[in-house]
Every structure is written in structure tokens, then in C-alpha cells.
């Protein structure tokens, strides 16, 4: 194959869909794949089910430096609870598990679980707390600990792991509309493959951290080491790896929210990897990496709203116009509600340490400051954190709601 033809095929928009590429270049396809195998694919120290290395194309997987910068940038800790709440809701929704948001918020506020759903939410909360501690390194023992606290302890019957075992003891299948869409690796091979996974996670190999996190994410879903919860574990391990690498804002970015918004493409990327492997005889994870680059990493943007709010709040704080109780209420609103609506009655109940009159005065006052939006709906007023700071603050903006 001449260099011009190879370059044309390598830059073709169907480079990650080999079925379409083969249809377009039927006479050149086999030679093209052989050249990729011999000279262009980067091998990973992870194996497919036949014991061959997983591979990827570096030419197609450049990561936006803005995403790296964002994940490295320290965030105000008051946003942590809301960010984890969003992550719990989204990572569950991806697998069609619909948690009631009020239940998630109740658990995040430290209330005891009242039912099975809240027990599962509590487990995920414990999981996020576990991976946020950089002293908890990625080992097989800690992966098992994370799985059990976040998911495994709340499963029933045949979905549970056997006592003393880290992984499933039998076959597992992923079902789709057309039947079986994926079969996890044989249970007898899991200990060796998971050791390989942990070694790769801890290796200093020079692979871009964001790409490597996505590779680890793929591998857990590919191996399917559990009867249930593999997707949630893959996303937890993705974030855990980034936290271990010093990306301290990982839990402040709603990664699973981006995935949930593009859920169809997320699952299509898995399918594309497996379909390509049947044609090429090699498991190339590039389609999954490209999915993450385009639909997650490239979508990450610094939240200018929070920056503006912080600057405005600090100005007001320096002026001496905010009481200690109001400062606590503001931090609670930021961390608990984020961009969601709330009422003064709801805030009084959730905060639990201020009289209704104090809460009402806070809401009116912070509306006047321009930090909260207020909207009258029938017989109540709905508040939310302001999305955009006004050029000139209208100190009478909340008068109609008094």
C-alpha cells in the first residue's frame, strides 16, 4: 500500500468503525489493518479474552488540555456535597436506576437510611468518601472493599459475591434488545486479569492520565468481574485513578452527568470496540477513548458562575453585612442545592440549625445582594442560586416577595 492511500484511510472519518471502513476500501482493508498492527497500534499491558494485548491509536486520542487544567484546579469545598449528589444520581441513571433526589439529599445531609433505596444511596456515598482519600490506594483488596461498601453489601440472592471471594464465581452476560451483547471473561481467569488491571493502574508508563482512566474504565466493563454493579464500579475506578494521580477536582466535576447525557453513545462505543475486534482480530479501545474525549473531557468547562458568585460573596463578607449564621446558610445552600430550586421551609428543615425567621431573612437578604434568584409561584417563593451576576444590583429586586 502506498503512503498516500494509507494516510487517506488513517484520516478517514470511519477510522473507528471498521465495518464502514472495510465497505469503503474493500481491496485495501486487510493490508491497512496489518500495517496498523505492525507499526501504529500502541500495545497496553491488558489482555483481551484470547490473551492478546489491548491496543489503541495515539494519533486519534489527543486530550484537551483545558480538561486537564480543570481537574487539577482546586475547587471550593462547599460544592462537594452537591457534586457527589449529582454523581450518585447520574451514575445510577446510566443503568436505569432512578434514585429519588430527595432521598439522595437526605443521605448526603447525614440522615440514616430509611429503606433499601436509601441503603444503596448510602453505600455509594461511602464509596465516594473512600476514593476521595488518597491514602486508599488501588489494590485488589481495596477494590473489593470499595465494591462491597458501595454496591455488593446491598445486593441479594445470586447477585451477591461468595464470602471470601473478590469476584464472581460464574459466568455473566450483558443482555440487549437482540439478546446477549457481551459476555464477561470466564470467572476462573478473573484473578489473573484483575492483577493485571491493578498493575497497570499503578504503573508509571507515561500514558496520559485522562486516557488511562478511560482505559481502566473500559477494562472493568469489558471483564465484568461482578454479577451486578460493573458500570458503577467502572465509573468509580475512573475517578479513583484520577484522584490518586492528584486531580483533586475530580469529584467536583459531574463526570457521570456527561455520560448520562450521551448514554447511547457510551454504550455504542463499547459495542464498536467489540465489533471492530471481530473484523481486525485485535481489541482496539480507541473508539471508547474517543467517546470520552468528545463527550466528557471536551465538555468539561470551568464554572464561571461559581467564580463570579464567590467574588461577589467575598465582597459582601468583607463589608461586614453577613452574620455568622448567614455565612453558614450560604455555604449550606451552595453545597446542598447547587443549581436546584428550594424554599425557605425546605431550607429550614434541611439546615436544621436556624429558626424560620432567620432563614427567611437570609433568603431575602441574599436576593437583594444578587446572589439568589427569587420567583413567586402561587403561594410560595422559589429560590435558587443566581446563574449570572447582574451588572448593577437592584436592591429592591426582592421587595415583591416580602
Image (tube, rainbow, N blue to C red):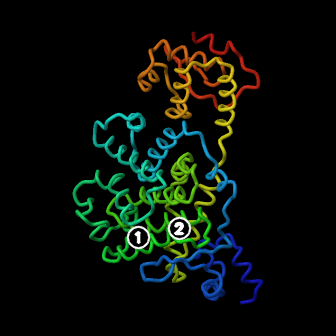
Q: Which x, y percent locates residue 273?
A: 52, 71
Indicate the secondary structure of the residue bearing disc 2. Answer: helix
Residue drawn at x 52%, y 34% as measured from the top left: 335
- Which residue lies under the disc numbered 1? 223
Quadrant where the N terminus is found in the figure: bottom right
Q: Which label's residue is closer to the chain start, 2 or 1?
A: 2
Marks counted in the figure total 2
The residue drawn where x is 54% and y is 77% is 44
Residue 172 vs 298, above or below: the answer is: below
As helix, strand or loop, the secondary structure at mark 1 comes to helix
Residue nearest the viewer, comparing 272 with 190: 190
Decide if residue 264 is on the left or right side of residue 297: left
The answer to which of 94 and 192 lies nearer the viewer is 192
**370 sits left or right of 150 in the view:** right
Q: Horizontal and vertical percent for residue 271? A: 49, 68
Q: Which numbered tag is attached to residue 215?
A: 2
Q: Position of residue 341 (x, y in %)?
A: 52, 28
103 w.r.t. 32: above or below:
above
Residue at (31% x, 73% y) in the render: 187
3D distance between C-alphas at marks 2 and 1? 12 Å
Image coordinates of residue 210 in percent, x first then y, are: 59, 61
Instruction: Decide which of 162, 140 is in the foreground and name it.
Output: 140
Instruction: Please determine whether, in this image, residue 114 is positioned above or below residue 35.
Output: above
Q: Quadrant of the C terminus?
A: top right
Q: Seen in the image, is 277 located left or right of residue 302? A: left
Neighbours of disc 1 within 10 Å: few (<14), some (14-19), many (20+): many
> Which mark, residue 112?
none
Q: Residue at x 34, y 64 (%)?
A: 226
**As drawn, 54 above or below 97:** below
- Quadrant location of residue 311? top right
Q: Are marks 2 and 1 in contact (CB under 8 Å)?
A: no
Crowding around mark 2 (Cα neighbors within 10 Å: few <14, some 14 to 19, many 20+) is: many
Amino acid at each position: 500500500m502506498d503512503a498516500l492511500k494509507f494516510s487517506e484511510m488513517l484520516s478517514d472519518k470511519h477510522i473507528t468503525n471498521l465495518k464502514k471502513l472495510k465497505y469503503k476500501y474493500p481491496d485495501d482493508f486487510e493490508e491497512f489493518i496489518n500495517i496498523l498492527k505492525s507499526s501504529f497500534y500502541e500495545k497496553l499491558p491488558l489482555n483481551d479474552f484470547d490473551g492478546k494485548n489491548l491496543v489503541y491509536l495515539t494519533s486519534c486520542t489527543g486530550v484537551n488540555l483545558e480538561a486537564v487544567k480543570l481537574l487539577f484546579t482546586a475547587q471550593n469545598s462547599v460544592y462537594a456535597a452537591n457534586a457527589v449528589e449529582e454523581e450518585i444520581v447520574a451514575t445510577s441513571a446510566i443503568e436505569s436506576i432512578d434514585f429519588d433526589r430527595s432521598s439522595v439529599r437526605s443521605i448526603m445531609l447525614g440522615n440514616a437510611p430509611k429503606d433499601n433505596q436509601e441503603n444503596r444511596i448510602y453505600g455509594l456515598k461511602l464509596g465516594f468518601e473512600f476514593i476521595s482519600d488518597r491514602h486508599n490506594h488501588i489494590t485488589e483488596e481495596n477494590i473489593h472493599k470499595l465494591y462491597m461498601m458501595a454496591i455488593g453489601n446491598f445486593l441479594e440472592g445470586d447477585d451477591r459475591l461468595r464470602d471470601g471471594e473478590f469476584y464472581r464465581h460464574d459466568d455473566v452476560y450483558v443482555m440487549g434488545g437482540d439478546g446477549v451483547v457481551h459476555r464477561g471473561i470466564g470467572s476462573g481467569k478473573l484473578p489473573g486479569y484483575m492483577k493485571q488491571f491493578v498493575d497497570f493502574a499503578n504503573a508509571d508508563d507515561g500514558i496520559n492520565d485522562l486516557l488511562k482512566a478511560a482505559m481502566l474504565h473500559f477494562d472493568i466493563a469489558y471483564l465484568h468481574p461482578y454479577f451486578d454493579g460493573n458500570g458503577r464500579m467502572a465509573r468509580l475506578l475512573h475517578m479513583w485513578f484520577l484522584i490518586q494521580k492528584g486531580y483533586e477536582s475530580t469529584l467536583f466535576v459531574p463526570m457521570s452527568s456527561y455520560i448520562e447525557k450521551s448514554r447511547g453513545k457510551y454504550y455504542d462505543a463499547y459495542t464498536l470496540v467489540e465489533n471492530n475486534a471481530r473484523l481486525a482480530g485485535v481489541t482496539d479501545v480507541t473508539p471508547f477513548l474517543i467517546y470520552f474525549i468528545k463527550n466528557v473531557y471536551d465538555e468539561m468547562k470551568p464554572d464561571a458562575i461559581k467564580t463570579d458568585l464567590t467574588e461577589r460573596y467575598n465582597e459582601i463578607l468583607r463589608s461586614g453585612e453577613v452574620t455568622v449564621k448567614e455565612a453558614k446558610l450560604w455555604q449550606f445552600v451552595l453545597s446542598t442545592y447547587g443549581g436546584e430550586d428550594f424554599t425557605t421551609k425546605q431550607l429550614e428543615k434541611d439546615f436544621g440549625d436556624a429558626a424560620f425567621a432567620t432563614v427567611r431573612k437570609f433568603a431575602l437578604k441574599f436576593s437583594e445582594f444578587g446572589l439568589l434568584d427569587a420567583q413567586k409561584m402561587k403561594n410560595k417563593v422559589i429560590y435558587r442560586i443566581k446563574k449570572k451576576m447582574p451588572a448593577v444590583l437592584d436592591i429592591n429586586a426582592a421587595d415583591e416577595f416580602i
